Image (tube, rainbow, N blue to C red):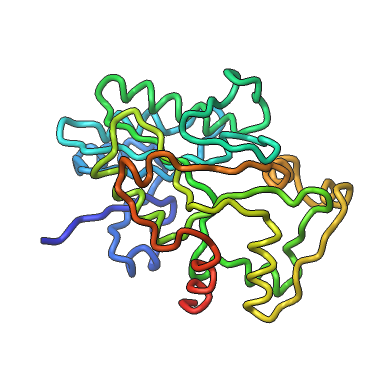
Amino acid sequence: MGVRVVGTTRRSHRPDMQAAGLEVLAGELHDAAVLAAIRQLRPSLVAYFVPPRRGNDPLPTVMGASTHPALDAFLYASSSGVYGDRAGGWVDETTPIGNSDGNSGTGDPLRAAAERVLLEASQHDVPGRVCRITGIYGPGRTLRRLLATGNYALIDGHDVWVGRIHVDDLVSGLVAAWIRGRNGSVYNMVDDRPHRASEFANLSADLNNLPRPTVISEAEARQRYDRAELRLKLASKRVRHMLLKTELGVELKYPSYLTGLPASLVAG
């Protein structure tokens, strides 16, 4: 039995989505026609990957249009960026974010606010689950192009701790959150091995026979990157999953980048 998958997009011409087997629903998420189409679909699952917007964010409207008694899950794709900079410390699903731990302003306030909207709604009629996603890598997402063009740089004195997950394991995690997740829960989508930013970049360069990334000063980084991008590059934390294996039952295909990165390069 086939599964009908519909993807929203602002552009009507999306051959990439069609090639992947998705039906295209084009338009802005605030458009009455788009919302009416979502209501008519009566989806079993909504996977919401839309970045939050300042002001008129469409998340509450989409939740209202897609919620019905037979909806299994509304997955909100958040980011581990909500934890902000923890100076290399450990965080997990139980770690407070935002004002409650004095870390306000260092994380991603828009995503944190969107999470609150979903989690509050999950106490009522929305089967919401938050999936905090770390750096995604896989075929075509290995830094190869950035390294080849010299556009990837490390910042002197800031070899930050980062978390990653292979795209195959991310898909497994999202499906598991749909099937076995609990309403109102938060799940960290991350592998077993936090690592320094330089470790991943250097291994990718070595495997591709490319020069290792240059190291620039913090002053140069402040000129090169805008404020938001620099904040992300300077954020250092070790993200741990507490529920991915124990509650969702996910067996990671690639527990760390040490196996996942070589496999990704072989696959393209």
Identify the residue at the far left of this view: 1
- Write the residue at 55% across / 66% down: 258
Q: Is residue 178 above or below residue 257?
A: above
Determine whether, in the image, residue 239 is placed left or right of residue 36. right
Q: Position of residue 197 (x, y in %)?
A: 68, 56
Q: Position of residue 194 (x, y in %)?
A: 58, 51
Q: Is residue 14 above or below residue 32?
A: below
- Write the residue at 52% across / 29% down: 95
- Write the residue at 55% across / 36% down: 91
Identify the residue at the far bottom of this view: 209
Q: Residue 53: in sight, yes or no?
A: yes
- Write the residue at 38% across / 45% down: 244
Determine whether, in the image, residue 208 is placed left or right of residue 7. right
Determine whether, in the image, residue 56 is placed left or right of residue 252. right
Q: Position of residue 137 (x, y in %)?
A: 52, 61
- Total number of numbered discs in the rendering: 0
Which image quarter holds the N terminus? bottom left
Q: Is residue 218 above or below residue 99?
A: below
Q: Residue 13: in sight, yes or no?
A: no
In front here: 22 or 46? 46
Q: Is residue 61 above or below residue 14?
A: above
In front here: 257 or 182? 257
Residue 146 found in image quarter:
bottom right
In front here: 121 or 88? 88
